Image (cartoon, rainbow, N blue to C red):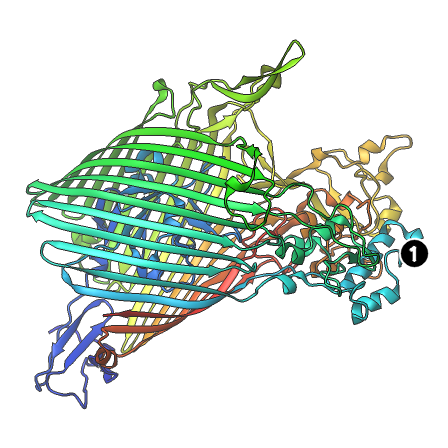
Amino acid sequence: MGEPIIGASVMVEGTTNGVITDLDGNFSLSNVQKGASIIISYIGYGTQTIKWDGQPLSITLKEDTEVLDEVVVVGYGTQKKVNLTGSVASVSTDEIKDRVQSNVLSAVQGTVPGVTVISRPGSSPSINFRGRGNLGTSEPLYVIDGAIADATFFSNLDPNSIESISFLKDAASSSIYGSRAAYGVVLVTTKQGKKEKMNVSYSGMVGVKMPTYLPDVLDSWDYASLLNEAKYNEDPAGGKHQAYSNEEIQWFRDGSKPDYYPNTNWADLVLDKHVLTTQHSLNFSGGSDKVRFFSSAGYLYNDDFMPGVSNDRYNLDLNVQADITKWLTLKSGVKYIRNQSDTKHGTAWIANFVMVPSIMVAQQSNGEWGSIAGGKQATQTFMNNNPLRALSDPNWSKSTTENSMYSLGFDLKPLKGLTVSGQMDYKRYEYKSKSYTGNRSAINDFTTGEPIPGTESTSPNSMAMHWISNSTMLTTLTAKYDMNFGKHAINLLAGTSYEHYNYERLYSKRTDFVSDGLEDIEQGNEVSKETPGGSSIMESKMLSYFGRVNYSWNDRYLLEVNVRADGSSRFYKDNRWGIFPSVSAGWRISEESFMKPVTWINNLKLRASYGTLGNINNVGYYDYFRLMSSGSNYNFSDTAVKGVVEAQIPNTSLGWETVALTDIGLDLDVLDNKLSISADYYIKNTSDILLGYNVPRETGIWSNPSLNLGKVRNKGFEMSVTHRNQIGDFSYSISANIATNHNEITDLAGSDNMIQNAGDNIRWILKEGESIGSFYGLKTDGLYTQEEIDAGRYYIYGRAPQAGDIKYVPQREGVKYVCDLAKGESTANASITDDDRTIIGKDVPDFTYGINLSLQWKNWELSAFGQGVSGTSVGFESEQVFAFMLNSNPRKYHLQRWTEENPNAHAPVPRLYGGTSMDEYNKHFSDNQLFDSDYFRIKTMSLGYMVPKNVVSKWGISSLKLFLTGENLFTLRADKIMKDFDPESSTGRGISALGTKSIAFGVNLSF
């Protein structure tokens, strides 16, 4: 007899009649009919179902080895998780289904340590493995059911069709993909059919989406008061009511003259703040001894906050396997994704909600579009950017994106242990769009009734069509051989693949349509037909050979060796081939004889790996060719003659960017697998990064050539911890992960201090010894006080500062205060210059983390997942930080300004300036424009109820789950100064798009 199990759940199947075992493992159930099924379960042990024959029961539970037997998908195969020697993390479909988030890439955000997903409002999510590896693109490779895909295809998969997602993070696990895997690999396995009766399942939800943040602009009376203050700060002699009198401010406040002194909130007028989202998925699966199938159809509809804009997505999946003989299996798969976007009329730019102030009339009382702002005629900019007017424009657009993938393959088993597999995959992407821009009539002056020049369209109406198509044909052939003798196990893999990629793009435009109702581009004026530059054709090919050897002795000592050779048409013949090897080893200490007495340790494994990977994504398709470009004119006898010029000199020396990655890891499972820990430390060195070098324009070369010169290092630590337990009817699982990363540019080959534009005045810098994404600007020390100005304890920056202006701190030695200048000494010695700029922050986080909680009690379940980042900043400029920039509307953030009445030297916002001159002193890029973008966000929270089987079985249903789920409902932000920006916003103006949060009700049922 074994030890008694305390707290095991004992329940009559299909009912709520259940108990838990006592201290001696005993239990007693009442009202149980003879022949009823009794379900006994406990965490760490296999669940048993026993038919009760009316006699007392004696039950022995067996340890559940599922955790140790878990199989993980790796490159060109699968491996038991306990025998992995590389760093591989996996996410199951249970972790991403039932989410309102329709983008799979966003759904995995924060679930895997070392894999950073950024979901910026208005942008497609981006993913990064273990830090930024180079100065350009560092996107991972996507592989779906063995076929090469891309982020767009992966993001738009139906989550209900996904079986598992594996993230290959180190060289040992990734090098089998060679030149494509420098920045990680995302492996997706979709659901396959099984030998079982026909199973039909449906999953659907209907919900509502809301903006996470909206620009918190000032009301018109506050706008008027602050503009008076700003003008006074600039010209005190003009008095404190240079823009608006107290009477006018009162008219704004009481709304008594709405045609002249309104209080306009553009977000309230224009946006739909609660919009519909719905998604549905219908799956069919089953199979016999010979044939197995899985098929799925999905639909997603997303309404937009902007009226008249909607998006639809359709998904179709089909996987079929057929055993022709005992030694031959045929496989086929079809995946089709169609995205449709429809804009029925004109749309407003979100930034105009701030750029057009609240003093602007949206629509006059006579029905005309607003022509008055603050009691006088509005500027042309205000009138032309009126967000409400934009909705009435006769513009429209339609676009369709089709992503499809077709696969056909076989598994041949001629000998015991030998499997020969072949697969042909064809992936096609096609984008088609058509857009129309109509004419605007002039706005009539509300006061005079006359048309206002400059408010009408100055260009003829036009229609444009855009078409992009690319396709990839991939053929793969592999041979695997598994053999075991005694305590030795050897697995061999050898393979080859050939890939052919084609890209084509076309653009067409016509103008002068006789009616806004026409949709045929042929109805435009043929004389004005255009085919602007940008139409192109590209092609590339790659041939690869790869192999892998796995060796295991008694499941205790593990060794894996990988190598891949890639030859790409993008390189000159002398540099075409790259070879990428890796080696990894593992020691399962828990299998040693001296560990047998330590029964609370189920698995303890040390692992280490080293390997090299390549990157081709930053190399052009024809960099080693001499390229000519048309469109340039030559002068022959005073006559312009069209000709061509050399646009690119041949670059035959280009080679592969190379990533060398070292990883040391630990895996630990203890307490009957109730607690699992996985930790990794890595060093990733990227070398031969492409850097451009300047070529004098006199040579006629338009684009700068590149050489393999740069180096970047990433170092970091990752850890994930999972605890799971069951106490009677209650079970829970808690997991957390954290990942640190230190990014450093180690070599720029003499091109140090490369300054890059990140906006109008925001700057980044690439500097040896510093991180990619470092902000380059001026350091500050609060604001000047009147006492400092009076004492001359200030520096000059274009002009002498005033009290409340930003106090820039010089970084050069020898810069003096004005009061310390000797008589006759140049004020240049007391001046701030661009040479005082330094690194003031970065947008790369120090660490990222995630927390997952799952609770189950009887038929109820509650789950929540949170994700966050720390150590990062975001830079804002223009109207996002500068009040009255381009006459824009200040926001409540600006109420924290310095004033004469509140001369706070540490006020977040400096002295305001306004008027046409818009003083530039406080607009130089500095740490005053950086904001803390650290956050912790509850990405999803879900409450579900599984309807008892004895209830749903009466309806012919095998299972039914009802759930309520929310997305991005709560956010804790580190920044307490500017409260109306989404912490995932990108650097720049910051208000070009809106983040979303949502709540939905859903149903999962199966028959």
Q: Is residue 898 above or below residue 275?
A: above
Type of the residue with mark 1: Gly
Residue that appears at 80% across and 66% down:
252
Can I make out residue 696 in this image?
no
Q: Is residue 41 above or below residue 103?
A: below
Task: Check the picture and name the quadrant holding the N terminus.
Answer: bottom left
Q: Residues within 10 Å of mark 1 (few under 14, many from 20)?
A: few
Secondary structure of the residue carrying numbered label 1: loop
Q: Position of residue 980 (x, y in %)?
A: 62, 60
Q: Nearer the viewer, residue 326 or 628?
A: 628
Outermost right residue: 237
Q: Position of residue 281 (x, y in %)?
A: 33, 62
Mark 1 sits on what residue? 239
Q: Nearer the viewer, residue 848 or 53?
A: 53
Task: Check the picture and name the quadrant holding the C terminus.
Answer: bottom left
Outermost bottom residue: 31
Q: Is residue 845 above or below residue 899?
A: above
Outermost top residue: 637
Q: Position of residue 103 (x, y in %)?
A: 42, 55
Q: Quadrant of residue 563?
A: top left
Residue that appears at 11% across and 58% down:
288
Q: Nearer the viewer, residue 125 or 857?
A: 125
Can I make out residue 249 in this image?
yes
Number of residue marks: 1
Q: Position of residue 176 (x, y in %)?
A: 27, 37
Q: Quadrant of residue 596?
A: bottom left
